[in-house]
Image: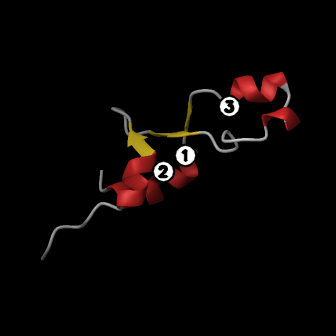
């Protein structure tokens, strides 16, 4: 039986942490910042951890 292939689109967007969590970049950060408050812009910096309910699905895509 052949090996399962990693979904390359998911591999480019998500990283698996040592404890098995998945981190990703925030949405809504490419343009139109004039319509967002300073607090919104500040909170969109960095990365976010993925919700527990969706982690199982993404682990299957990432094969980890």
Snapshot colouring: secondary structure
**What residue did someone put label 2 on?**
55
> The residue tagged with tag 2: helix, strand or loop?
helix
Q: Where is residue 9 drawn, in percent x and y? A: 41, 58
Neighbourhood count class around disc 1 (C-alpha, 10 Å): few under 14, some 14–19, many 20 upward: few
| Apparent side of residue 25 relative to residue 42 in the rendered image (left or right) | left
Q: Which of marks 2 and 3 is nearer the N terminus?
A: 3
Which residue is rendered at x = 37% and y = 51% of the image?
11
Q: Name the residue under label 3.
A: 44
Query: Which of these two is toward me, 26 or 29?
Result: 29
* Residue 34 numbered mark, or none: none
x, y percent for residue 40: 78, 29
Circle 2 Cα neighbour tier, 10 Å, few/some/many (<14 / 14–19 / ≥20)? some
Circle 1 is placed at which residue position? 52
Disc 1 versus disc 3: nearer the observer: 3
Most distant residue in the bottom direction? 1
Question: CB of mark 2 within 8 Å of CB of mark 3?
Answer: no
Task: Kindly report the distance in space between the C-alpha atoms of the residues bearing marks 2 and 1.
Answer: 5 Å
Q: Distance between the residues labelled 1 and 3?
A: 20 Å
Q: Are marks 2 and 1 in contact (CB under 8 Å)?
A: yes
Q: Badge 3: few (under 14), some or many (20 or more) residues near its Cα, within 10 Å?
A: some
């Amino acid at each position: 039986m052949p090996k399962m292939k990693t979904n390359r689109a998911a591999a480019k967007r998500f990283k698996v942490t040592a404890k098995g969590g998945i981190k990703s970049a925030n949405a809504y950060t490419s343009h139109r910042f004039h319509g967002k408050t300073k607090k919104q812009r500040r909170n969109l910096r960095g990365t976010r951890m993925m919700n527990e309910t969706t982690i199982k699905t993404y682990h299957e895509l990432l094969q980890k």
